[in-house]
Amino acid sequence: MGANSSDTGKLASSLHRSILGALLAIAGLIGLGWVIEAIAGGSPLFGALGLVIAGFAAFWIVSLFVEGTRER
């Protein structure tokens, strides 16, 4: 019974990372869209904010991958 609960915990953790990764990917794409829009429109503050959002999302997605490989 201990192995099943361990497998269930791993499944729940993996599902949590997958959902969070998908939401972060969407946020990163929106941030990149802001960067492209700012470059075209000439708004550097808006572009910097988009770049920070995209960078934060990318960093967090990489940390989710690392966490997943360490859990295996």
Image (cartoon, grey):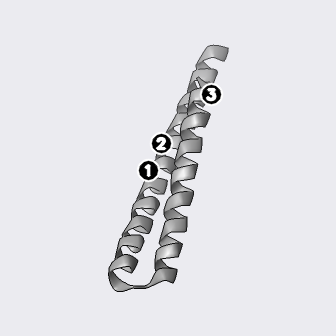
Give SS at disc 2: helix
Residue at the image position 61 percent from the left and 35 percent from the top = 67
- Taking 18 as reference, is 1 above or below it? above
In front: mark 1 or mark 3?
3
Quarter of the picture holding the N terminus:
top right
In the rendered structure, which amino acid carries the disc numbered 1?
A: Ala
In front: mark 2 or mark 3?
3
- Taking 60 as reference, is 15 above or below it? above
**68 or 35: nearer the eye?**
35
Spatial separation of the CA atoms under disc 2 and disc 3: 15 Å
- Which residue is at the far bottom? 42
Spatial separation of the CA atoms under disc 2 and disc 1: 6 Å
**50 or 27: nearer the eye?**
50
- Image quadrant assignment for residue 34: bottom left
Quarter of the picture holding the C terminus:
top right
Give SS at disc 1: helix
Within 10 Å of disc 1 (Cα), the crowding (few <14, some 14-19, many 20+) is few
- Taking 47 as reference, is 16 above or below it? above
Pointers 2 and 3 in contact (CB under 8 A)?
no
Residue 58 visible within the image: yes
Pointer 1 residue:
22
Give SS at disc 3: helix
Residue at the image position 59 percent from the left and 43 percent from the top = 63
Within 10 Å of disc 2 (Cα), the crowding (few <14, some 14-19, many 20+) is some
**Residue 9 placement, left or right of 39:** right
Pointer 2 residue:
18
Pointer 3 residue:
70
Pointers 2 and 1 in contact (CB under 8 A)?
yes
Q: Position of residue 51 (x, y in %)?
A: 50, 67
In the rendered structure, which amino acid carries the disc numbered 3?
A: Arg
Residue at the image position 54 percent from the left and 43 percent from the top = 62
Spatial separation of the CA atoms under disc 1 and disc 3: 20 Å
